[in-house]
Image (cartoon, rainbow, N blue to C red):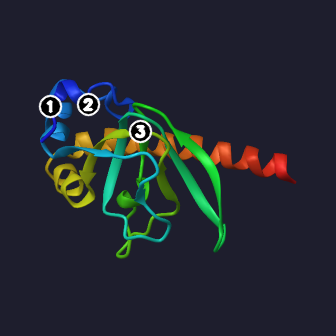
Amino acid sequence: MARVEEIKSVLLLTHLEKEMVEKVAAIATITTVKNGEYIFRENDKAEYLYSLLEGKVALEIEKNTSTSVRVKDIVPNRTFGISALEDAEEKKSMSHARALTDCKLVCWEASKLERLFAQDPKLGLRFMKRISIILKNRLQVAYAQMAQNS
């Protein structure tokens, strides 16, 4: 269980009421990852949503079997691992997430989030609206990168 004070700076949570943040904190864990370690790899089973508290994480996609392309850097208070929240039987990570420094992360098990959202639909709606904004922003960045490369 994470403390509210530890996670309240996470941008994903800033639009939630205090009681909602307390519920989300109750099912969160805090973990650390060393520089260079992978948090997950492309096509891994996606089971956790993450928010970065300290450090820097690169999201990378495989260009081919020997080359990965860095598509996004995650900085503190930003969220990644959104594939864990998709409504699919077999959830797969769409990218690698590699620590560029020693990192401190908030982790939410997707199944626990889903149960929480079923118990508190208002919380689930607000949370998922923020996730949709993150996805929109990531798509805009991806389109801009494609436009530059064409």
SS type, badge 2: helix
* Callout 1–callout 3 Cβ contact below 8 Å: no
Find residue 136 and report its image quarter: top right
Please indicate whether residue 18 sits to the left or right of residue 51 in the image.
Answer: left
Residue type at mark 1 is: Arg
Sooner in the amino-acid sequence: mark 2 or mark 3:
2
**Disc 1/disc 2 C-alpha distance (Å):** 7 Å
The percent position of residue 67, horizontal first and vertical second, equals 67, 65
The label nearer to you, 1 versus 3, is: 1
66 up-or-down from 35: above or below:
below
Sooner in the amino-acid sequence: mark 1 or mark 3:
1
13 up-or-down from 34: above or below:
above
Residue under the point 31% across and 56% down: 48
Residue type at mark 2 is: Ile
SS type, badge 3: helix
The percent position of residue 49, horizontal first and vertical second, equals 34, 51
Query: Can you tell which mark lies on residue 48?
Result: none
* Callout 1–callout 2 Cβ contact below 8 Å: yes
Q: Quarter of the image containing the N terminus?
A: top left
Residue type at mark 3 is: Arg
Q: Which residue is mark 2?
A: 7
Dot 3 alpha-carbon crowd within 10 angstroms: few under 14, some 14 to 19, many 20 or more: some
Q: Quarter of the image containing the C terminus?
A: bottom right
Query: Can you tell which mark lies on residue 3?
Result: 1
The percent position of residue 107, horizontal first and vertical second, equals 27, 47
Query: In this view, which residue lies farthest toward the right?
Result: 150
Q: Which residue is mark 3?
A: 130
The percent position of residue 7, horizontal first and vertical second, equals 26, 31
The label nearer to you, 2 versus 3, is: 2
Please indicate whether residue 48 sits to the left or right of residue 18 in the image.
Answer: right
36 up-or-down from 73: above or below:
below
